[in-house]
Image (cartoon, rainbow, N blue to C red):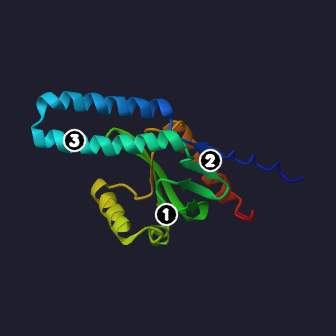
């Protein structure tokens, strides 16, 4: 008698948490107001430009609310990375690292070039330098504004990675 098949991990989909994004945008506007009293005119203008860009991005995120992270039988997809789905067989290590008080789920892959080549040369170079400077994989998922917590996302990735690496006979 064959042992029962382990349960296939459920597909996990994460989007931007609207409340967190509203809060971050409100705090940015308040910080800008405080800067009026503390910053020089030049600094105030530079911060205003940065705020305008940040608010435009935040509003775009609120209006589109597209899926950001998908964990399924094919692998890990973070649409923000722009590298497509990272296949389970390519992931060698999964860990959580904190950077600037934000949790990042980091994925180490067997062939970084395979995924980095999907980006432009400038972005690829920037990702490599940032990864080296921050001592963190360029394949990292910032969980700060997602509607799924770091622990839940990390556990889903670990469980799926374990499951699909054990069942390589399945077509992925």
- Residues 26 and 152: in front is 26
Q: Which of marks 2 and 1 is nearer the N terminus?
A: 1
- Using a 10 Å C-alpha cutoff, classify the residue at mark 2 as few (fewer than 14 neighbours), some (14 to 19) or many (20 or more): some
Q: Which mark is residue 109?
A: 1
**Residue at x 75%, y 62% (from the top left corner):** 170
Q: Which quadrant would residue 23 be assigned to in this image? A: top left
Mark 3 or mark 2: name the one nearer the start of the chain: 3
Q: Do the residues labelled 2 and 1 touch (CB within 8 Å)?
A: no
- Coordinates of residue 161 in the picture (x, y in percent): 61, 54
- Mark 3 or mark 2, which is nearer to you? 3
Dot 2 lies on which element? helix
| Label 2 sits on residue | 159
Check disc 1 and report its element: helix, strand or loop.
strand
Q: What whole-number distance in Å separates the C-alpha atoms at marks 3 and 1? A: 37 Å
Q: Is residue 149 visible?
A: yes
Residue drawn at (63%, 44%) of the image:
12
Disc 2 from disc 1: Cα separation: 17 Å
- Residue 143 appears in the rendering: no
Above or below, comparing residue 23 to residue 11 in the picture: above
3 left or right, relative to 106: right
Above or below — where is 139 with respect to 28?
below
Q: Name the residue under label 3.
A: 47
Tell whether 12 sits left or right of 43: right
Residue 25, image x, y percentages = 37, 33
* Foreground of the two, 48 or 117: 48
């Amino acid at each position: 008698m064959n042992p029962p098949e382990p349960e296939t991990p459920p597909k996990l989909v994460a989007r931007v948490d609207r409340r967190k994004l509203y809060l971050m945008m409100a705090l940015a506007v308040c910080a800008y107001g405080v800067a009026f009293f503390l910053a020089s005119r030049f600094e105030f203008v530079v911060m205003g430009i940065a705020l305008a860009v940040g608010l435009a991005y935040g509003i775009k995120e609120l209006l589109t609310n597209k899926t950001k992270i998908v964990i399924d039988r094919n692998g890990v997809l973070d649409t923000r990375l722009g590298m497509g789905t990272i296949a389970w067989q390519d992931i060698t290590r999964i860990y959580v690292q904190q950077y600037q008080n934000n949790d990042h789920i980091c994925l180490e892959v067997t062939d970084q070039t395979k995924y980095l080549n999907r980006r432009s040369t400038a972005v690829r170079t920037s990702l490599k330098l940032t990864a080296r400077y921050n001592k963190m994989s360029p394949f990292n998922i910032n969980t700060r504004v997602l509607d799924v917590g770091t622990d839940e996302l990390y556990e889903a990735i670990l469980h799926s990675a374990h499951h699909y690496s054990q069942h390589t006979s399945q077509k992925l």
